[in-house]
Amino acid sequence: MDIWKDILAALSGVLNALPQGLLAMTFGFASIPTALAFVVGAAGNMATSNVAVISYQAETLTLAGTMGRNMRERLSMIFFGAAILAVIGLFGVLEGIIDWIGPVVTSGMMAGVGIMLAKVAWDMARADRLIGIVSMASALLTYIATADLVYTITVSVVLSSIAYAFAKKGGTKSEPIPSIKEGFIRQRLVMNPSVLRGALALVCLNIGANIAFGKINGEIAGADVNVDTITVISSLADMASSFFGGAPVEIVISATASAPHAVLSGVLMMILMAAILVTGLLPKIGKFVPSASIAGFLFVLGAFVTLPGNAIASLTGEEAGSGITGAVTMIITALTDPFFGMLAGVVTDFLLGLFGAA
């Protein structure tokens, strides 16, 4: 039964990644070389027994896909940003940051991410109401009945994809994916002020995301996650992918973390994604899985799993003024991203201490 749940969680992770993979293609990133990133991720997780998987992340895709004047600059931003993060991870900087900012700010970031996930899920469901309603309703019912994230994402994605198939028969059409030159084609990287600015933007986004998402995966799996280790793995994966024209892949919150054997399930998920990408199956399979199909899982993950415990921990710290620091961190994270939420929490804590309120 445990092995079955491991496989089911891995398949659920693949289903979760497919819509984001199609988003990557709409930004012009090639899918076949992105398989290298998943291979690096699988190898890294096997070597380090890490439970946090790498996959397509909508925030990084959107930032990387819209900055810069052309594809060469965008791929250069991803490569050099990943190289900077790899150095940061190798020197153990992120674990030091976690120790420095303390549990109140860390929990506030994670609670803010929970709000962010719930908001994203709600927006997805509103944009595609039929699929969104099916996904949300089935996810809520499944999680309330089982309290199991593996079954939650599997049931909600499958049922909403079936609803999507019937809707397509009624005349709904998907947007065409632009033509992309596929294959392992070495890219000519460039460095200029625009590329440097974009690389630093990606570094800032992923510092906060790696801390928050990594810790959430560890919390779900009941395992310790070294944020520097997962940062090095995801950075090497990004460098391998972007060097040949592929998309960025980052640490994500995955259903595989809730599998009985989280490491094994995560590795299987990344191997399956690599196989789908290298064989060119992504556009074909992705046509059957609408992006709104993951709305229900994201809502449950944010509102039921991530937010409550972390919000309580952040707002009820022992030190005076910790509730204010936690609230500011939570709100700014939810409105912007984990990096700015972390900065806001640190600044608030400093000011409270400076003026004697903490």
Image: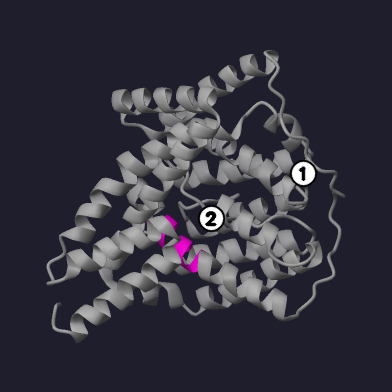
Magenta highlight on residue 177: no
Q: Is residue 310 above or below residue 270?
A: below
Q: State the residue position of label 1.
A: 278
Q: Nearer the viewer, residue 287 or 123?
A: 123
Q: Which residues are magenta?
A: 206-215
Q: Left or right: 125 with respect to 332?
A: right
Where residue 250 appears, as percent x and y from the top left, is 57, 57
Q: Residue at x 17, y 84 (%)?
A: 355
Q: State the residue position of label 2.
A: 45
Give, as a three-letter code, the residue at label 1. Answer: Val
Q: Main secondary structure of the magenta part?
A: helix
Quarter of the figure that contains the N terminus? top left
The disc placed on residue 357 is none
SS label for mark 1: helix
SS label for mark 2: helix
Q: Left or right: 258 with respect to 125?
A: left
Of the image marks 1 and 2, the number of the one nearer the N terminus: 2
Where residue 289 appears, as percent x and y from the top left, is 62, 29
Where residue 253 appears, as percent x and y from the top left, is 46, 48
Q: Residue at x 38, y 65 (%)?
A: 341
Cα–Cα gap, marks 1 and 2:
20 Å
Snapshot colouring: one colour
Q: Residue at x 36, y 27 (%)?
A: 140
Q: Residue at x 32, y 26 (%)?
A: 146
Where residue 117 appears, as percent x and y from the top left, is 43, 46
Q: Pointer 2: residues within 10 angstroms few (<14), some, or many (20+)?
A: many
Quarter of the figure that contains the C terminus? bottom left
Q: Left or right: 223 with respect to 238?
A: left
